[in-house]
Amino acid sequence: MKSAKRKGAKPRKVEKETLQTDEDEIGLKEEEEARCIAEREERERVERERLEQKDRERREDELNELRHLLEVNQSAVKAWEAACRESAKWDRYRLCDGSPNPAVQPEINAFISLWKEDPVGQIQPLLQQCAMALRLTDELDLLVREEPEPSVAQMYQETRLTLQNLIHDKLLQATEEILKSAKEQSDIETGNMQAVVRDDNVTLCLWANLNKNPRFKGHQFKEVGMGFELPKQLVTSDIGVRMLHTRYDHLSDLSRHARVHGRRPAAIEVGTVTLLAQTPEVAEDGGMRVEGKERGNPQHAEDEPQSLRTQGKKSASVQGQGREAQTETVTDRPTFPGEGADEPDSTPAAVESVSDTTNVHVVDLHQYTPLGGVFYFDVFYLPPQSVTVNGWEMRKLLDTGLLVFPYPSEQSQVHSSVAGRVEESGTHSSPPVGVTVRLPESVVFLEEPQVARWDPADQQWRSDGVSETCYQAEERSLSFKMASFSAFTLLQDSHANMPFQSWELRPLGQDSAQLTITAALVEVSITVKGNRCMLQMERARELTPILGRWMNLPALQAAMRRSGINMFVNEYSEKYVDVHAKDPLIEHTAYEQMALVSSAFAFSWSRWNAQCQQQHLVLQVCEQLEAGPVPAKAWSLYLLGAQRSHRLKMTEWSAAFSPELAEGSEFHSTFLHMLRDGVSAEGWARVNHAHPLYINTVQALLCSTRVLTFS
């Protein structure tokens, strides 16, 4: 028995010794692995410190080189712009088309005075005069954007507003002249008069109630896609109805002006639309005096428009790159080109509280964009018609001008305010009027358009007073009811396409690149060649006038906004779009340096950009010297910060974010020098030969879209 126990104990002892040996070996391996890891981490730490030290040693040289490069380009652009302004002045001086030079005050004053006194004759010559006045207002807009002296800018603004008032006044006089002869132009079938006059800028539809048929309901101007419905109170009255569609918008500027300055400017009424009361009178010294114009229901001018405030712009690259290491920093938010470009009366000093309103029905023009111009819907007393007596044509002349027919009447308004609601029987004391319009052919409505009416008292667009809206997308038709006759416009969310889903900036050759943005509702491509840009889109019949046309960037931005395709942000956009905010200075710095190398490098959106901190940007970069798509495996990730930039070891498809430096790469104080490390000789030659105007255009395009924040 004892012998058997000894035999059983020996194997157990061997097993214990074996297990102990295995445990010792495992322990030794773990210690070796830990030692190797520690040594590797130490080597990485030492290497990182060496690279950081190397970056610090060359930091000042890199910043100085970048600063010099940006200054040289900026100087070249300013010199070119100055030469263009001088050339434009000379071309304007040599222009012999009969139009005055709006920059020369005596000329424009004489034109305004003579046109003001000129009686309205034939409608077509009048429309040509209005078209010339519109061109003059556009010239004045350009002059204001050149940021002249404040007093000069104010003079340009006053002249522009005066021309706008005169245009509306002349169209009102033309309406009166046509309605005076309504009887001679009456339709045999209906007994009423209906007329349509149009050109490239306006469409004027007039209807005169001569027959007073109590069964009449409304009229459709089928050739222009506009129509109206009248309540029974109006079909037996001596009235004329005007539907005037102007493809320009002079009312929204008044709203912006009033809200920026916290008040509304002095105004007069033209039809049922209130415009600024500023008509010029040429003084003996050749200057301009402003006086209240007495027509319709006049109000005396109380205030004059404020002058534009100018704001200087400067490069933020060097300050942004050296913000933490140098005391020379910029703490203010950089001004991105294109912000507020369509708001000529806006100023940087306007605080957000001015744009906010406690009235939910007031349209926020920072959030919504009026598209397709303005529709003026008016009802007037029908002027006395001529009578033939013994072969003599006799007409009663009135010195009151065209008078607005009050609807709803004052009694109805008082009754409605007392009742506070529609009668229980479901009838209205003053039923609404019906309106039908066809959407403008040159505008893309990405969503169902919203209707806003003009409030002449407070100088703003409002969404109340409009009901029973019916939108037919296939027919591009919109019908609705309004509580009263009023000017109205069609609205679209200014940020309907934001945030962007993705973007890519790809070079097409020397001084040529293409920015493609996949937005929330559409995809657009903007090709840059030199200082010219071209828009490309699919399935955009409404954009035919601007697709494939080369124009400068400001002109393209304005055309896209007018057409309903807004890809450009302003200083208020972050209030209405859910974005991952980035440091504006670092973002602006990135755009400057991306533009410098855009002839040789492609850039693209990265999903990791939204997951890193506010002080960092992540984007995909690849050298691309041939036209065509960038291979997916060719992209590399770069991390940009205030102090330094570097290439990441991770890829776009990595499972988690890691700021680890890529092997064989280094830290650099600027993005430009980071990219120069691995570029080919041909690629760097393209960068060195990039034209300053091309660089400036690409930078302005990136700053106006802000793809690094709004994607």
Image (spheres, rainbow, N blue to C red):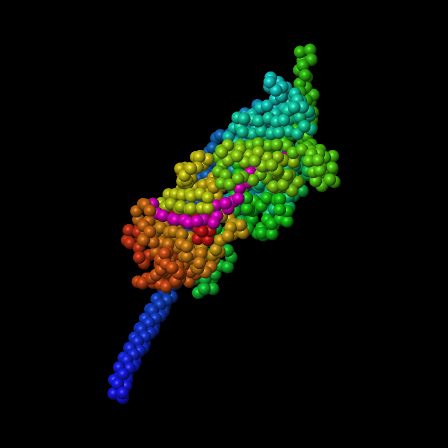
Q: Residue at the top extreme?
A: 390
Residue interval drawn in magenta:
485-508
Residue 413: name its quadrant.
Answer: top right
Q: Is residue 235 left or right of residue 531?
A: right
In magenta segment, residue 490: yes
Closer-to-camera residue (652/690): 652
Residue 545: name its quadrant.
Answer: top left
Residue depicted at 50% across the width and 39% down the height: 445
Residue 223 percent location from the top left of the image: 53, 26
Name above or below for residue 564 compared with residue 219.
Answer: below
Residue depicted at 44% across the width and 56% down the height: 610
Residue depicted at 29% across the width and 54% down the height: 680
Residue 50 percent location from the top left of the image: 34, 69
> Is residue 56 visible in this depiction of the protein?
yes
In magenta segment, residue 637: no
Name above or below for residue 475 compared with residue 530.
Answer: above
Closer-to-camera residue (302/117): 302
Q: In the rendered view of the protein, which quadrant contains the N terminus? A: bottom left
> Is residue 546 visible in this depiction of the protein?
no
Total labels drawn: 0
Closer-to-camera residue (219/8): 8
Residue depicted at 65% across the width and 20% down the height: 211
Residue 444 percent location from the top left of the image: 48, 38
Residue 586: name its quadrant.
Answer: bottom left
Residue 488 percent location from the top left of the image: 59, 36
